[in-house]
Amino acid sequence: MDLLDPLLAFFTDNGYLAVFVVLLACGFGMPIPEDITLVAGGIIAGIGDANVHLMCLVGLAGVLSGDAVMFWTGRHFGERARQLRWVSWLLTPKRYARIEALYRRHGNRLMFIARFLPGLRTPIYLTAGMTRRVPFWRFLMLDGLAALISVPLWVYLGYFGAENHAWLLLWIGRSKTVLAVVFALFLALLLVYVWRRRARRRRLYREREARRQRRQPGP
């Protein structure tokens, strides 16, 4: 939270453009918490220096632009992207192996899940572009759906807590817990859906094999 006051001063002096630029930097993997940046944008709206609804739109534009740049960096350079110094810092071999495991488990749905994985979000988008596993329109749709959940939450939290920082700090912690619980529930439902779908496919396969064997003439 030590970053909140400098962000507030910067945003107050420079308005929406500053919020957009910082969020764009977050998308590039800069060590600036995206949630605190959005909360700071909401606070300056709460004290009357910005419009909260417009701030939500700026927040969405900032996070999606940063994510899209990472995706297209990976798409343009392919595996050569890992030779870039800043990419190699973000996408270490250990992290790349972890992302590969996540892709095998969740497939393209990882584009939605990534929004709630701060340490892996940027590397995941880079890898998505590098491996060409997901078309850009699907990446943008899934990432956008997740952003529609997270961005308004943090902006409006800052807006309503602008005059009461003690309350705001309390609810930032609670909101992170709520997001973690919601994400865990979503992931559990997703795993159940995948398991049931695979079980149904196996059952249909066994039924087809049984019918095929019954149609075969006997000896």
Image (cartoon, rainbow, N blue to C red):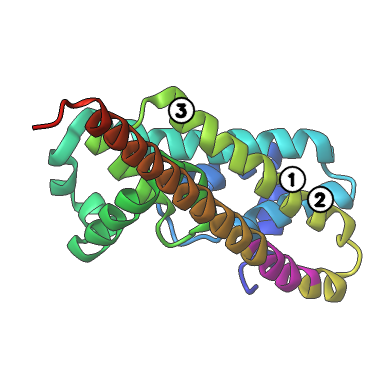
> Within 10 angstroms of label 3, few (less than 14), some, or many (20 or more) residues?
some
Foreground residue among 12 and 67 = 67
Residue 17 in view (yes/no): no
Q: Where the C terminus falls, by quadrant?
A: top left
Q: Which residue is mark 1?
A: 152
119 left or right, relative to 20:
left
The residue stretch that appears in magenta? 171-179
Residue farthest along the front direction in this orientation: 219
**Residue 216 sits in which quadrant?**
top left
Question: Is 75 drawn above or below residue 84 in the view shown?
Answer: above
The amino acid type, in three-letter code, at marker 2 is Tyr
x%, y% of residue 4? 67, 65
| Cα–Cα span, label 1 and label 3 | 22 Å
Q: Residue at position x 74%, y 45% from top?
A: 152
Question: Is 219 drawn above or below residue 110 in the view shown?
Answer: above
Query: Which label lies toward us, 1 or 3?
Result: 3
Q: Which mark is residue 47?
A: none
Q: Are marks 1 and 2 in contact (CB under 8 Å)?
A: yes
Q: Which residue is mark 2?
A: 156
